[in-house]
Amino acid sequence: MTSRRTTRSMTSLHRNSLPVPDELAMEIFSRLPSKAMAMCRCACKLWSSMLRRQDFTELFLTKSCARPQLLFACNDHSVSKYVFILSPQPENPEENSHVVASNHLACFPSSYELFGCTNGFLCYGAKPILEGRINPAYVPVICNPSTGQSLILPTLKSRMRFGIESYLGYEPIAKEFKVLSMESSYVSGHSVRHQVLTLGTKKLSWRLVECCIPHRSSSKWICISGVLYYAARAVGSSVNSMVVSFDLRSEKFSSVKFGKAMPDSTTLVNYDGKLGLLMSGDSHDVTRSRTSLELWVLRDAAKQEWSKNVYVLPSSWEDAVSEDMCIAGMVGVNEIVLAHWSQRVPSYVIYFNVERKTITKVGIQGPEAFTAPNLHHSLGMGRSRLVPLDSIEEYERALKLGPNALGGVAAIVDELPYIELFLAERTGFKIVGEPFMNRGWGFAFKRDSPLAIDMSTAILKLTETREQKRILKKWLCQKSCGEKSDWNHPEPNQFHLKSFEGLYLFCVAITVSAFLVFVLRMIRQFVRYRRSERTSLTPRASLSSSPTTTRLWGFMLGFVEFVDEKEEATRSDDDSNNNPSQVVELQGDSEVRQS
């Protein structure tokens, strides 16, 4: 019955409206985010066939290149998966505040090593389970992190599971993707059995290609204009000192000598259609003390000519960087991208503009990319104390168990809308402390809703302009300022000023008591001193005849003078104890005078 109503609705729609031209539909789809476009492929067969066409793939790739983004492949060892995060570049790099929203894409099982990326497709090695058993061979896998699709390639003509390198390249003339794989010899360590596979054919199969260049391949590679380049070691060398190229169209190998050893920080980049070697001197990473970066550009491969460019880092480099960085790549010919070396998911990246000599620090906002690194680095929480939780039910169960039980936690850190939704459904819990954000406005969606990502991106684009401040000031400032006092209420398991009230009173009582004891002792000593002075020097009758006011005033002045004399006597005693030789001399003088 539902199927019939749907059919009549679609018939009525086509009968009373004009169809959307394919060209217009493709232009609309090409402007969607990759994840939204992937969802559209599952909407209907018409859209699925349209979005799988080669001309749409080229159009979408052209539109995507106009808005370049950074793709992070993060190996989550806790779940043995690769987590792919897509982060756009800031639209206003001149602004002081830079925060971009990360788009968490699909997850894939982790491999021994991630080979690399070409035109949005990734190549990595895996051990797939075939017919209920783990295949012992090392199988390359091609995946699209935007759509979540993956393709397991045929098993290589080898029984080796280690020492295999695979490179994914795109040949623009024939519009073909090809995979080049090779293995290392157990005896010499050189690359042997070079094999090529062409994607898109009816029957995927590996074919052997001849390579007459003795070398050992590496994991540093890039595809530029239909040519695969990868750093390699020459015969008898222990470091990379040459670049081997593989023409995807002719399937021929060639090599270019670099002339010196490449440091571990070397990254292969596309510099205006030419191969570039970007490096940080001889070090493995880019430290705060680094003063410059080097870029070697292959000007003529036939003549093996290289040109060297040295980019001096500005003085703001040390202020922007707090940890060791690594070279992530290069955007165009002007901007070098650097990311944190040891973070599993980078919380920020650095853009170094070589023309303007500027450093731009861009934060990557996301559940894992923003929260965990800040808790670890800013608040000093150990990574072993952080437990990932995925659902509200896990939140409630972990909080009820408490920090002392297995699987329990002391607190939950999440985005404010999810925390408020959790509190609306569960009682007995409370927000502790003030959120790490500017109080304002936002949108709450169901977790993993596709609209949340697009809306978050739009909101973050708005925060990069001054329009948000104007809106907050006009509509939300008074309410936010009025609600600010609500956060000052005492929270459980938190120290406040009133928490130390008893300690303050105890300290005040001890201080006042000590002062009173000191004053009373001094008064007692002064009274004794006055009595002895009156007895020896002054008749009692003359003192008793003085007015009361005069006697009180004289008593106070005498007490002050007595305290001063007492302090001077104490100082002289301390000096005599510190200088005993001086005391002996004085005693000697007195003996001489007496004699």
Image (cartoon, rainbow, N blue to C red):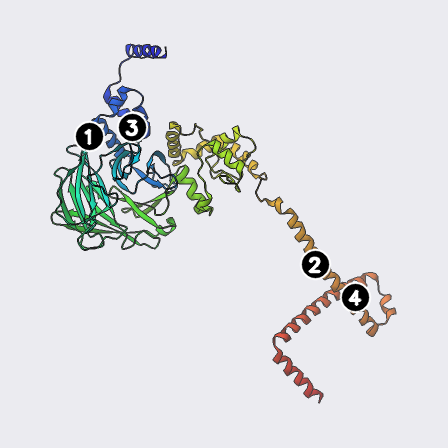
Is the residue marked by circle 2 packed among few (<14), some (14-19), or many (20+) residues within 10 Å?
few
Residue 274 place in picture, x, y as percent: 19, 43
Can the viewer see residue 8?
A: yes
Q: Nearer the viewer, mark 1 or mark 2?
A: 1
Q: Nearer the viewer, mark 4 or mark 1?
A: 1
Res. 587 image quadrant: bottom right
Q: Residue at x 30, y 48 (%)?
A: 357
Q: Which of marks 3 and 4 is in front?
A: 3
Residue under numbered circle 2: 514
Q: Distance between the residues labelled 4 and 1?
A: 110 Å
Q: Is mark 1 on a helix, strand or loop?
A: loop
Can the viewer see residue 431?
A: no
Residue under numbered circle 4: 527
Q: Which of these two is toward me, 21 or 386? A: 386
Q: Which of marks 4 and 2 is in front?
A: 2
Q: Which residue is drawn at 20% across and 27% down?
A: 54
**Residue lying furthest right in this view?**
541
What quarter of the picture does the C terminus occupy? Answer: bottom right
Total labels: the figure holds: 4
Q: What element carries label 2?
A: helix
Residue under numbered circle 3: 31
Picture layout, residue 226 above or below residue 241: above
**Residue lying furthest bottom in this view?**
595
Q: What element carries label 3?
A: loop
Mark 3 or mark 4: name the one nearer the start of the chain. Answer: 3
The residue under label 1 is which amino acid type?
Gly
Q: What element carries label 4?
A: helix
Residue under numbered circle 1: 200
What quarter of the picture does the N terminus occupy? Answer: top left
